Amino acid sequence: MVAYETFIGGTGSDTSVGIGVDGGGNAYLVGNTSSANFPTSGIPYQTAPETKGTQCASITCTSVFVSVLNSSGSALTYSSYLSGNGNDQASGMTIDANGDVFLTGTTTSNDAPAVSPVPVDFPATELPVPFQVAPNASIQFFVTKVNTKAPGVASIAYSTYFGGGLVSSGTVAVGGGIAVDSTGNMYFSGTTNFFNSGQGEFGDSSQSTDFPILNAYQPCLDTPPPDHPRQSKPMFEYATPYAVSYGCFRCQAEPQCTSRHPVAFLDVPWGEPKRIRARQLRLIPAPLTFISPAPQIRAISSFPRE
């Protein structure tokens, strides 16, 4: 028996990346839209997409949408654009017990944060202070928390850029999945060729254009993982050779992203790098376990909380 079925969209291209349902039967949807008239509701962060810049001169750029349907599917209780001046693409979403929406993806927008002439809190908030306040390259990852019960700009509870500097051979950034635990820590994944110099203990680096790595099992894309004194046994099986051009990563961020937890590249051999994906991320209660669905990566890793 079908309880309800409905269209949600505008006159452009509208695609979803995920759905979550709370205990009251309300449905939370996240996706991407090129529609200028995607339905908004409540007191949204944005009622229309941001004016796109030169990043979109030769391509059709999209904006992200976050929408909440009531339990009967008869009305939107919240619906908003999350849009900057570039190409904004969500790739994964989840919700928590409070009905907050957590999403990740990629963006070429470079106009946030700003407070005038209008507040701009996506892809990065002014307050709370984000982990990364400005993009380091033309494309970056983003991580955003939306409080759908708060009005207007206040509904963007937190948002940050996340990425490295320009890669001369061409930057690759493909959004992945996101999960959140009971204390609000966010876990997200993706695929990238952003560079990390590997300087410092366990890959920590003071290089501003390095892809952010902390306490890394594998700090460099093209280097076999070293013996890691913080692990009692190897976490990943690797095929040979170790040389790669792309890699998947996963990251844990504090609720306000005031500090980072282990971030790791998961390398794959040369051959079919374009097939690498890290789009799904699933949390399993203690110890926290991360599963990569990519066929080239034979990995099940466990990072107990410190």
Image (cartoon, rainbow, N blue to C red):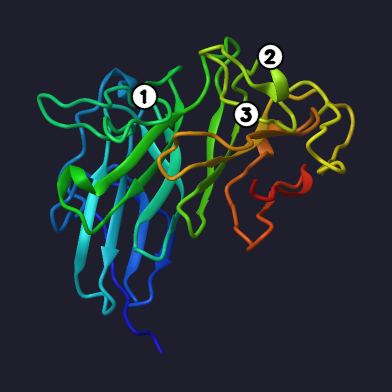
> Which residue, as the protein is rendered here, is positioned at the far left?
117
Q: Nearer the viewer, mark 3 or mark 1?
A: 3
Label 3, on which residue? 214
SS for dot 2: loop
Quote the CA–CA distance across marks 3 and 1.
18 Å
Dot 1 falls on a residue whose secondary structure is: loop
Q: Can you say whether 129 is above or below 252 in the image? A: above
Q: Position of residue 242 (x, y in %)?
A: 84, 26
Q: Quadrant of residue 168?
A: top right
Instruction: Please tell me how crowded label 1 is: few (under 14), some (14-19), or many (20+) other residues with Cα within 10 Å.
Output: some
Q: Nearest the camera: 255 or 78?
A: 255
Residue at 21% across, 25% down: 114
- The residue that disc 2 covers is 199
Residue marked by disc 1: 133
Distance between mark 2 and mark 1 Cα atoms? 23 Å
Looking at the rendered image, the quarter that the C terminus falls into is top right
Q: Amino acid at mark 2?
A: Gln
**Mark 2 or 1 closer to N-term?**
1
